[in-house]
Image (tube, grey):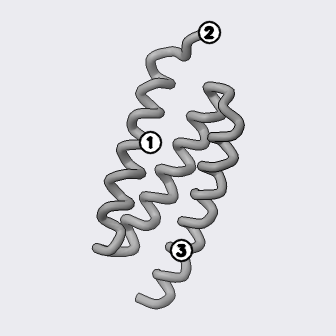
């Protein structure tokens, strides 16, 4: 079964957001938070396509990035 087009668009947006924000995260804490949000979106995408290993991996990345954002914000 193939996913609806909006699900595929969600996946593309999530991955593009993650890659872009990861590359720009040294510019400020906003990009670390946006990276965490992109990881969370990728986890939602993984759930929607029933890819549970990817869901777990992206969920962990979202938590790690959110923690990094929290620490970086305190240090800024």
Q: Which picture quadrant has residue 46?
A: top right
Q: Point out the image quarter for the C terminus.
A: bottom left
Q: Position of residue 2 (x, y in %)?
A: 56, 12
Q: Residue at x 44, y 58 (%)?
A: 35
* Tag shown at residue 14: 1
Q: Residue at x 59, y 72 (%)?
A: 67
How many residues crowd mark 1 within 10 Å: few (<14), some (14–19), many (20+)? Answer: many
Q: Residue most toward the bottom?
A: 75
What residue is pinned by disc 2? 1
Q: Which picture quadrant has residue 54?
A: top right
Horizontally, is 41 left or right of 19 in the view?
Answer: right
Which tag, 3 or 2, sits closer to the chain's start? 2
Which tag, 1 or 3, sits closer to the chain's start? 1
* Tag shown at residue 27: none
Where 68 sits versus 37, above or below? below
Where 48 sits versus 18, above or below? above
The answer for how far apart the CA atoms under marks 1 and 3 are is 19 Å
Q: Position of residue 39 (x, y in %)?
A: 52, 51
The answer for how far apart the CA atoms under marks 3 and 2 are is 37 Å
Foreground pick, 66 / 55: 55
* Tag shown at residue 68: 3
As helix, strand or loop, the secondary structure at mark 3 comes to helix
Q: Residue at x 40, y 74 (%)?
A: 29
């Amino acid at each position: 079964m193939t996913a609806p087009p909006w699900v595929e668009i969600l996946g593309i947006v999530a991955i593009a957001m993650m890659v872009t924000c990861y590359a720009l995260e040294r510019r400020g804490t906003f990009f670390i938070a946006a990276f965490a949000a992109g990881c969370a979106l990728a986890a939602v995408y993984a759930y929607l396509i029933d890819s549970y290993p990817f869901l777990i991996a992206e969920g962990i990345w979202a938590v790690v990035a959110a923690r990094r954002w929290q620490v970086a914000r305190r240090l800024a």
